[in-house]
Image (cartoon, grey):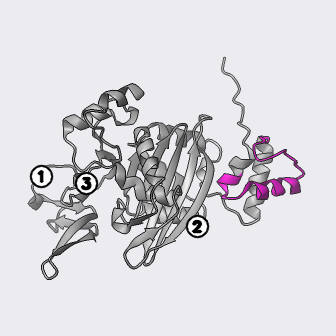
Amino acid sequence: MGGCRVARKPRVHEIAAEFGLDSKTTLRALRELGQYPKGPSSSIEPPVARRLRQALTAAGHSSPFPGLDGDGAERAKTLIDALPRRMPNLIDFLLHDHGSGAMTSILARAAADRWFFFAPGRAHSALYGHASTLDRFRLTDLLAPTGLALIERPNSHLLLGWVTDPGMLSLASADFSTTSGRLSVTQTQTHSAAIDEASSVILSPNTALSTLGSLSSVIPDRASGSSVARTASHDRVTEARIVDNEETRVIYATRSTLGKAAQRTTGTSASPRAGRWEVRGHWRNQWHPSVQDHERIWIAEHTAGAAEGSVSRRDRVYLLSPRASSTSRTNETDAL
């Protein structure tokens, strides 16, 4: 005999986060509806939550992720459980018919170039350790000028989406909780920082911007297949070194894999003369003989190959996972 399904009672601060509002504004809206919860952590009945969302929408506020209402939150949780392979699907789900606020506008722009990065749980301490001391970074330290990164944390995930414009770096961040068996937004923020004449971003430590600037710090310069396999074998999301299917390819991020421009997204071994392929955008060290120095420049994505050939493209998700040294693998294994 099947049991009745009981709708979950959302908390005030959860609905506030859905709309990118502070809890005081949300509590004020509840009082106007004749509801008087004790505080941001108070739960409210589903019909009241529905009326609250309608009132906030009527007041000109928009939920950044409307797809997380109702059963959508459970659908999103299944995508979270299938990370990193399903990261492109999760992003598309979150941004489908998204709100019109500044945060989702930045995320939508960040998703346009399809640069996806995933930092599994084992990268957490190294990433935030570096971020706590960072006070500036150069634009060339970014994994890409525009992109999305999802950072796995205990019972939560942090989504970062960034875009660069002349003289300005814009970043949107969203915290997601998965403790209730559903995906729910707990906090959303937008950040911006000026880019100085030296192409550097100056920031305060322990911010989402410092986390963004630290993403490249967990990427090993070079990784052989055997060393990566030993390190990743104890990591739930990285047990398979490369996950490859028709939709998405998951690749360990190294300086080499991020810098190679000529890899075709079709994943085939056909001769370059036989078809066309899309070359991903990438950083390149351009040598200038006149000044006897290198300049790191960004090569935009472009199509190469025979003009009459067809192009097939798949998304790629780059795994940001630090490689343990041979002397520390035993201790790291015990800790995991």
The residue closer to the viewer here, 112 or 204, is 204
Q: Earlier in the sequence, mark 2 or mark 1?
A: 2
Q: Callout 1: 10 Å neighbours few (<14), some, many (20+)? A: few
Task: Look at the picture and state if 54 lies above or below 73.
Answer: below
The residue closer to the viewer here, 173 or 303, is 173
**Element carrying mark 1:** loop
**Element carrying mark 3:** helix
Task: Identify residue type, mark 1.
Answer: Ala
In the image, taking residue 13 as reference, residue 331 lies left or right, namely: left
Q: Callout 2: 10 Å neighbours few (<14), some, many (20+)? A: some
Q: Quadrant of residue 10?
A: top right
Q: Quadrant of residue 189?
A: bottom right
Closer mark to the observer between disc 3 and disc 2: 3
The residue indicated by pointer 1 is 270
The residue indicated by pointer 3 is 255
Closer mark to the observer between disc 1 and disc 3: 3
Task: Identify residue type, mark 3.
Answer: Arg
Q: How far apart are labels 2 and 1 at the CA level?
A: 43 Å
- Furthest residue in direction top, as rendered: 1
The residue indicated by pointer 2 is 102
In the image, taking residue 164 as reference, residue 325 lies left or right, namely: left
Residue 138, horizontal then vertical, whole percent: 37, 67
In the image, taking residue 13 as reference, residue 33 lies left or right, namely: right
